[in-house]
Amino acid sequence: MTFDILTLFPGMFDGPLTESILKRAAESGLISVRCHNIRDYAKDKHRSADDAPYGGGTGMIMKVEPLAGCIEAVKEERPRSKVVLTSPRGRTFSQELAREFADEPGLIIICGRYEGVDERVSSLYVDHEISLGDFVLTGGELAAMVIVDAVSRFIPGVLGGAGAAHTDSFSDGLLEYPQYTRPPDFRGMTVPAPLLSGNHAEIARWRREQSLLKSRRVRPDLLASAPLTEKERRWLANSEGEGGAQ
């Protein structure tokens, strides 16, 4: 899968996307990340990419001409790639959306900056406006990195183990269950007995129950839309007040 990043600051991507899992994925040919400097498509001698907003107001707006030139140049090479604009007013990014994006042949991610992007860019080119949440960053570069990382995890082979991403938090609508590794006893805190039992059915039951309890305690909003069975709903009702690992 190819990620084309349209940015005013391509140097920001040198570290985060060239280390660890993403580095190995790129070296294996599973993903490709290309950065494009929007200023390269500016027409004036100062390579201007922003200007004051019509109607007045504080801050600057990213200009339509350099962005249009950059998008069109990339689209010529990647006609099937979807165009994503990082923006505080966009749809909130989620595990579900990351999985959906992973099925695309490629993504062209525009890193928003300043007070926003000329609306004509959205009208003409953008397929998805995406926000990380109800807060504002200094620019969309960090958001673009998060999108690349989250989407890449769903590309077969990137994580190594088949289906590894599908057991993460939010993959089934709930938070992930607690995890443990050696030693079995640390300062009097022991690993829960079901995990040491070797009984796969018992382990699965324990993990599901802990996932339910963790979600109720930390993110009760998730339970409203999670695909719970009637038995699980009754179990939750009967375990009111229970918390942590059992």
Image (spheres, grey):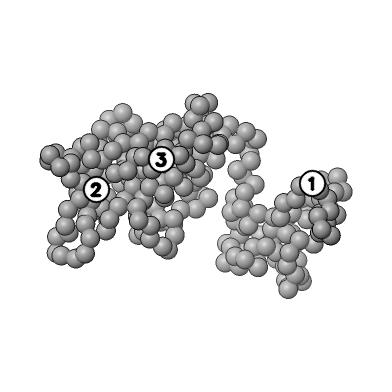
- Determine which of the numbered discs, if any, sits on residue 121 in the image: 2
Position of the N terminus, as image quadrant, is top left
Q: Residue furthest bottom?
A: 241
Circle 1 is placed at which residue position? 182
Few, some or many residues within 10 Å of mark 2 (<14, 14–19, 20+): some
Residue occupying the point 19% across, 65% down? 57
As shown in the figure, which amino acid type bears the numbered disc 2?
A: Val
Does 33 appear above or below 196?
A: above
Few, some or many residues within 10 Å of mark 1 (<14, 14–19, 20+): few
Circle 3 is placed at which residue position? 13
Does 184 appear above or below 45?
A: below
The picture places residue 180, in percent across and down from the top left corner, at 75, 50
Q: Secondary structure at mark 1?
A: loop
Report the front residue among 207 and 5.
5
Report the front residue among 244 and 200.
244
Query: Distance from label 1 to label 3 (Cα)?
Result: 36 Å
Q: Quadrant of residue 55?
A: bottom left
Residue occupying the point 29% across, 44% down? 8
Foreground: disc 3 or disc 2? 3
- Of mark 1 and mark 3, the one earlier in the sequence is 3
In this rendering, does residue 102 appear at all? Answer: no
